[in-house]
Image (spheres, rainbow, N blue to C red):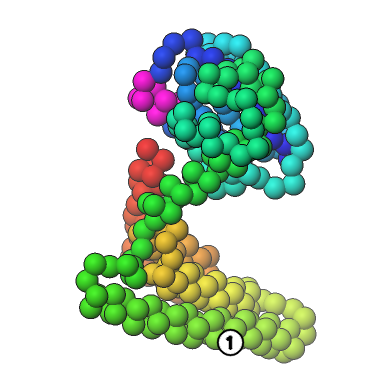
Amino acid sequence: MIRLVYTSIAVKDLKSEDLLQILKTCRKNNSANDITGILLYSQRTFFQALEGEEAILLPLFEQIKKDPRHIDVTLIEKVEIKEREFPYWNMGYQKLDKADFQNLEGIDHFSQKDFNPSGLLAHKAIISPLMKMLKAKLVNQVAETAHEELPLQHEDPFIRILNRAIRLAVKFLAFLMVIVIILGVLDVLYVIYEKVASPPYLLLTINDLLATFGAFMAVLIAIEIFINITLYIRSDVIPVKLVVATALMAISRKVIVFDFKHLEPEYIAASSLVVIALGVSYWLIDNKEQD
């Protein structure tokens, strides 16, 4: 895995909608290719860091250099990395002002006017503190926009007390669900032992396989329920998407172990409609987030 850092000059001043369109395209393509990174735009200068597999990034950089929207594309850094600096952002975006440049740690004689390909190339030492600052800003943005179902900082003291009580209840439910998951794993082991230890030995019929799969699915669904329980005390996720994803995975796994010989057509048709409805719902939510 490598990180490429390059800079370039926009052929014209870009408006907010132009930048949003660039980011939308980058995020869609980067997500499909497991690429992460950040984009900084200031004074018609692009500064971009890209992280991913070398076999993917190098051809991508060749395409970037041919993009007619910018010129003077300059590779500042190409390094091998063991872990990503921006693992949670397909393409983060930041703006920096004059004060930000003045607050860069350990860097002297670098100002906003030096933020251009030649200036960055001459001051390569700025790359590390600059990316550190950009990452800190992204993390702060996430913290500021974090969603909490049961906030402990509610303006009403009584609501704060109730939220604390519910949070304790959620933690207790999560603990109980962990016990259920452990028991479920033990049940899976017992089911497998029961099937292979009964005559004919070490031979599983189709019904045995379905019973074994069913035991596995029950544990996986329990894990998803555990995640749903804990999301009420998390601030890094909006519940609706996770709930829809959990429901979709649960019914999809149930379909895998259907015994179609003993199911009514209406039951199968209804299950199909639920899968389609949940799939479309998840797709709409995901597209809305990307927009």
- Residue 139 in the image: state x and y as whole percent: 50, 49
Q: Residue at x 70, y 47 (%)?
A: 83
Q: Residue at x 35, y 43 (%)?
A: 288
- Residue 73 in the image: state x and y as whole percent: 62, 15
Badge 1 density bin: few <14, some 14–19, many ≥20, Cα 10 Å: few
- Whether residue 251 is visible here, answered yes or no, is no
Quarter holding the N terminus is: top right
* 179 relative to 74, above or below: below
Report which quarter residue 211 is drawn in: bottom right
- Residue 267 in the image: state x and y as whole percent: 36, 68
Specify whether 270 is left or right of 172.
left
* 18 relative to 57, above or below: above
Magenta region includes residue 146: no
Q: Which residues are magenta?
A: 15-23
- Whether residue 257 is visible here, answered yes or no, is yes
Quarter holding the C terminus is: top left
Report which quarter residue 33 is drawn in: top right
Q: Residue at x 44, y 11 (%)?
A: 12
Q: Amino acid at mark 1?
A: Leu
Q: Residue at x 47, y 33 (%)?
A: 99
Q: Secondary structure at mark 1?
A: helix
Mark 1 lies on residue: 183
